[in-house]
Image (spheres, grey):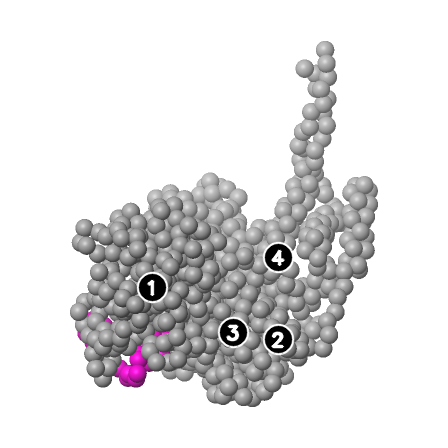
Amino acid sequence: MKTMKRFHIVRREGVSLRRKCLYYVIAIFSALLLGALLLLTCGVNPLDYYAKVFTIGLSTARFPAKQVENFLNALVPLVLTSLALSVAYKMRFWNVGGEGQFLIGATAAAAIPLGLGSVGGTVPTLLLMAAAAMLASALWGGITAFFKVKFGTNETLLTLMLNYVALYFVSFLGETKGKWNFFLRTDSDRPIFASVFDTVAMPALRIGDFSLSLALPLTVLICVFLWFYLKKTKQGYEIAVIGDSPGTARYAGMKTGWIVVRTMLLSSALVGLAGFFKLMTSGSLSASITDNVGWTGVVVAWLSKLEPLGIVATSVLICVLRFGCSQASVNVSAVDSRFSDILQGVILFAVLAADFLLRFKIAKKEEAC
Amino acid sequence: MKKVLSLFLAVLMLTGVLALVSCGSGGAVDLTVGAVYIGSQTEPAGYTYAHANGIKKAIEALKKEGYNVKLLVRDNVPEEDAAVTEAIDALAGQGCELIFGISFGYLNAFSSAAEKPEYKDIVFSHATGYLSNETNFNNYFGRIYQARYLSGIAAGLKAKANGVKGQDNKYHIGYVSAYGTEYAETCSGINAFTLGVQAILGDEALVHVKTINTWGDPQKEKQAAEALINTYGCVVIGQHCDSAQPQIAAQNAGVFGCGYNSDMTESAKDAHLVAPIWNWDVYYKLAMKTVITDRTAFMEDVGNYYGGLKEGFVDISPVSKNCTSDTQDKVDAVRELIISGEWDVFSNVKLSFDADGKVVRTESALVTNEGKTVISADNSSYYVLNDAGEPVAVEGGASAVDSIIKGSMNYFVAGIEVEND
């Protein structure tokens, strides 16, 4: 009789916080190291490069205030979208329709100043734009929840497909000249989106050269609100119960159908609001206005285990990487700004691997055969 | 665990050492130029490549004249105002004094950047756009239609020599275009090419246009060219799209073609005739040199740039071995007329050649393929079409004014047939 060694994956119990942190730090460092090797093969000094990335290019900038503004402008939509998506994920409702909801929100918001002009001054116009964005996105996302509850459709598929409907809708608006199409510049022979800045601008607090957009404090408020909502309210508890076990929720007498629809309305309305904020930094619509936050948001939400504070931290990290890589690429012609995508992918894999190693271990087991 | 850590540290140190090895520095810089690209600066061909290559050539040329120009690039910047603004801010922040944007959709962001007081000393230059200001913001583009007319002559000569006619006793020529009358750029290109063909074949030519609704998609470009060859029996394929696929399709079918953007003879050795090409470096050099010598004179000396054959900004690629023997002479004769300013493509004068190869000028109206007159035979009036397709009078000159060619042209001339799926 022979014995054979076999490898088994065994669940790990009671991992200390210290060990967790160590694993994640090693994961991120390994990813950066791999990136450094890649940079070296391109003939780029990785220390210089990373120095530029992690200081988001501030050290050499002539207009540092602008850098910080742009960084925050990129951060706000990502944080808000990730938070919004995480609300749906808590309920195990796979909303991968962030891109579409974002686009619809931005489009609805743009329709107000471009279609109606200024509606009784800046503040009413902005409020109306925000309301339009949230309402349109809520409906765009809510419909998928309605279909799931009513007909048992697959929400992943539905939200995913609606992304493309929204994308092509915006492309259509951007490419089709016509008297009805108030989204376009009227002075251009070639179709191009008009800017809402001619009508309305986001209030900002000026601190020297730096202007702080109102969108940032609002996002912080929403973040606090969501933390409170998910952790401390009955509705938040209902979401958690449905996420853990829909059967239990139903048994406990919760109206699960309505809760699913309600939560998705909230989730997509917030994505729509992110779309509105982004529109107020861009000025005009475009098919690429999302900056992929609808997709990146999914990654951020999962990397941070759906924890609001974790989402903010992860968003900052990813934004520093993306924004920093763009800044660094200005001075380095050998690697383009897409290097951040590689780095981001490697980090994601490394963190997932660390996650796996924290939850499981590979054990040897001798067996007779 | 320890093993993992020590390996990790070892690699970390190795990287550190290697990193310290690479270093570099340059001399005094006369000008720092920024460029915002829609594609990647490392692309081997295509639109971004054409501009990146032009800028590089201009910098090299200036180096020979003793000027040291430093280039900073932001690439893969989508046509999204926040992204473009961010790219401009980054370039301005690194000290750029002249910033180029190569894509039409950068319009809003470039025009608003130029108005910012902190950027008043930076010159913004936007390709294909139509906005500008009086101090530090211009647009630039070229009379590629002139080069297209010349390529049309080469195409017409080849079709005639080839001798294959359709059942309607006409020479069938194909043209794969990104768009049709929606864009003056594509529309004027198709018209100019057709008028060039007609200089040789007169009304015996029929140009079939197939639009693919994108500026570049190799698969669609190939399919469109194949459809033109197989369905309509086209013997020469012209194009206004990015890749060399239409030329390769022509070669595979044993017919001929005129490429675009760069000399495509390399891609289709047995099919390619000549290609209308851009020499972007001509403009880039002018713009850079003007900023170096006198930045305040930029809008006076360069202004909104619309260079043509005369400036060498557009041209055709060298006449290939596939062209007929008289192509060079005939193309040169017309080029001469255009460069001297005696004649331009969109006018009431049509060119043809007599038996000795001499250019003959005939006055006649320019008529659309729906029979509407858009330039009167006596050159007194110019028209574009309104929403209902009826001609409305516009400003004219010795030939169509630039605003028509760049902006409002929205008709196809007689002899063009649009093929829809």
Of labels 3 and 2, earlier in sequence is 2
**Which residue is labeled 3 in the image?**
B282
The secondary element bearing badge 2 is classed as: helix
Q: Nearer the viewer, residue B288 or B179?
A: B288
Residue A145 position in % (x across, y down): 40, 51
Mark 3 surroundings: few (<14), some (14-19) or many (≥20) residues within 10 A: some
Mark 2 is on which residue type? Answer: Leu
Residue drawn at x 55%, y 65% as measured from the top left = B53
Mark 1 is on which residue type? Answer: Gly
Of labels 1 and 3, earlier in sequence is 1
Q: Chain of mark 3?
A: B
Magenta-tinted stretch: B386-408
The secondary element bearing badge 1 is classed as: helix
Q: Chain of mark 4?
A: A
Using the numbered discs, state the Cα–Cα distance from disc 4 to disc 3 in whole angstroms: 32 Å
Residue B323 position in % (x across, y down): 38, 57
Mark 4 is on which residue type? Answer: Phe
Of labels 1 and 2, earlier in sequence is 2
Using the numbered discs, state the Cα–Cα distance from disc 1 to disc 2 in whole angstroms: 34 Å
Q: Determine contact: label 3, label 2, CB under 8 Å.
A: no
Between marks 4 and 3 in the image, the one whose residue lies nearer the viewer = 3
The verdict on residue B234 being magenta is no
Using the numbered discs, state the Cα–Cα distance from disc 4 to disc 2 in whole angstroms: 31 Å
Q: Determine contact: label 4, label 3, CB under 8 Å.
A: no
Mark 1 surroundings: few (<14), some (14-19) or many (≥20) residues within 10 A: many
**Which residue is labeled 2 in the image?**
B62
Q: Nearer the viewer, residue B166 or A51?
A: B166
**Which residue is labeled 4 in the image?**
A339
A361 left or right, relative to A263: right
**Which residue is labeled 1 in the image?**
B152
